[in-house]
Image: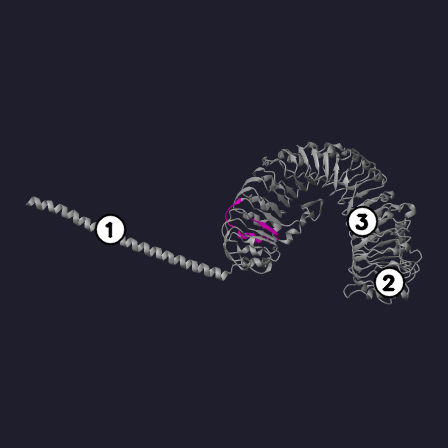
Amino acid sequence: LYPTFIHKLLAGVGKIREKAMPFLGVAVVLLLSLASPASSCTEQERGALLGFLGGLMPGGNGGLKVSWVNGTDCCKWEGIVCSSDGTVTDVLLASKGLRGVISSSLGDLAGLKRLNLSHNWLEGSLLTELVFSRSIIVLDVSFNRLDGHLQELQSPNPALPLQVLNISSNLFTGHFPSTAWGAMKNLVALNASNNSFTGQMPSSICTNAPSFAMLDLSYNQFSGTISLGLGSRSMLKVLKVGHNSLSGALPVELFNATTLEQLSLPNNFLQGVLDGSHIAKLSNLTVLNLGSTGLSGKIPDSVGQLKRLEELYLDNNNMSGELPSALGNCSNLRYITIRNNSFIGDLSTVNFTMLDLRIADFSMNLFTGPIPESIYSCSNLVALRLAYNNFHGHFSPRIGNLRSLSFFSITNNSFKNITNALQMLKSCKNLTSLLIGINFKGETIPQDETIDGFENLQVLTIDDCSLVGKIPLWISKLAKLKMIDLSVNQLSGPIPSWIDELGFLFYLDISSNNLTGNIAVSLTKLPMLLSEENVAKLDPKFLELPVFWTPSRQYRMVSAFPRMLFLDNNNFTGTIPPEISQLKLLDGLNLSSNSLTGEIPQEICNLTNLQMLDLSNNQLTGAVPSALNDLHFLSTFDVSNNRLEGPVPTGGQFHTFSNSSYSGNPKLCGPMLNLDCTSAATNQTSTSRRHNLRFALIIGITSGGLVALALLACFLIARLAYYDHTENVVPLRSRQR
């Protein structure tokens, strides 16, 4: 029965002390107001509501016209709540699909206390009649398309009753008003996040509101420093100003707000260190988010005094040193990420036994040693990332204690014995993502069928390990596998015929190996690449930790990854199977650097979702199919270093590809190659004629020479015969004499 925004703000603010209970008061009043009114609404109120309805676009009234009928009791209309005397107190129209503008007639509802128009498609400006109303205590217009500047309060007003203002996720611009807040002495929560406000943070914001508890200005374009006055707010529970362009050091005054429970300042341009004496003052903190702020120095020992701390974000900074052992005293810590810093030392300096960790990300640091044994006591751990460090050694059998572990990444360390690692990890029955590449250098990929389990595994990466052997049969048992990366190894043999039995597989990278044979037809039968109907079966749940595709691109859902086949840099032979056309949902196909022959099949033009096609460095012949210009999403194309000939397709995406996409094919022509196909054909014909003439001349001369030689030979033979005969006759004649 609560409006959505009240529920969210209650969750954000936390448990407010009794003298700052307006949120609970709002809830109680709301529940009481849901009772059936004893009287009907007034004609003025009915007219005001119909005026609002009239401001909506045709077809954009969310079906309100069904119940909002003139002449009927508006207290019985959809989304309307009245008090016992028939006064309209609530207009609750969240998520109704409303389109249009907010009519000023709502300002005529003199008894209106709560207005919720969130999650609609409303446009125009935010009316001052509503913000500076003499009756409204809760105003939520979040998640609309409202724009323009917020207006300043033009004349001094007595204290306004507004307690909650949520204008987040709109299109507001300009400087945030400063004078308006002097009259808002009852304000408890202000959410203006996810807009385009600019300029300095308002320094005087809510200085006159003694019960002010929550401020969210995140995801805007504020610049300058953090307002010093925020530290004097004695009831401030939640401060979120992340994802702006704020600069300077963390103000010392901010740490005087000892009631803070959530301090979130990520993605700004702050500087300095985290002072231990200051952070210790914030003993009520449950969330501390200083990620991507530019902080340096060490994590102070005093962090161990934050007994209520549940979430700690210090990722993407310039911090260094060893982790303080006192971190193990934060017994309520559930989430910690310190990725992408320069922390050093052995992670076992922290005793994780007392922590109830759910998600831990220690990646991209300089940690050494084995995985700390104490972390295996965190039986509720769901995600653990240790990637890009200097961890080494073997896996402990105790890793099987992590029964809840779903996401595990040790990419780019120095672990050994892949067979043992897999045998240990198969005890983690809930694993869905296993990323263990750039380890186990030069070992043999286990073929042992006793490597079972992993029945829930969806993502498996064992890339860049220089592993030898064949693609193992146990992978065929991973029935839920969606993504597999075995690239940059030394695997040999053919693509296994069972590959199409992986019914959920849509991403396969076996590039840079020593695989041989033809492109298996079984690859063209992968169900997840055949039809959208199959894709609907994919689990849409979020990953426990984001997977970073590139430094600037990350994925939070497995189903959001592109559908790709990487078979490049192997020893595949034969032709490209025309059955490839069945993979209608394929986003990328890389067959480069193999020994493929034959023509590019026309059927490949049916892959209308294709964004990347690389067939370079093969021995392909024939023409480039002209119908490829119908692939409107194609952004990467390369057929260089083959034996192709004829015109290159024109139009569509082919105007965007550089000459290098076709180099190494001297018989290709087209405007983008600055080689006219007509002249090329003429030159080829002329060259052919010259070649034929030259050949004919050579044949003629050779034939003539051979005839002459034959005649000469006959003449010489005849003479020799004559002389031989004469020499025989003369002596005879002499003797006869």
Mark 3, residue position: 241
The location of residue 656, given as percent across then percent down, is 60, 57
Are the residues flagged by discs 1 and 2 in contact, CB closer than 8 Å?
Answer: no
Tag 3: amino acid: Val
**Segment colored magenta:** 571-591
Residue at numbered disc 1: 713
Q: What element carries label 1?
A: helix
Residue neighbourhood size for the residue with mark 1, other residues' Cα within 10 Å, grouped as few (<14), some (14–19), many (≥20): few
Work out whether mark 1 precedes mark 2 in sequence or the reverse, and give the earlier one.
Answer: 2
Which residue sits at x=85%, y=54%?
A: 165
Mark before the other along the chain sequence, 3 or 2: 2
Residue furthest out toward the bottom: 71
Query: In this view of the protein, can residue 254 be seen by the observer?
Result: yes
Looking at the rendered structure, the secondary structure element under dot 3 is: loop
Indicate the secondary structure of the residue bearing disc 2.
Answer: helix
Looking at the image, residue 124 lies above or below residue 737: below
Along the viewing direction, whichever of 78 and 341 lies nearer the viewer: 341
Picture disc at residue 106: 2
User: Residue 50 lies in magenta, yes or no?
Assistant: no
* Three-letter amino acid code of the residue under disc 1: Ala
Foreground residue among 414 and 269: 269
Residue 79 percent coordinates (x, y): 84, 59
574 within the magenta span: yes
How many angstroms separate mark 3 from mark 2 (CA)?
31 Å
Check the image and tell me how it is coloured: one colour
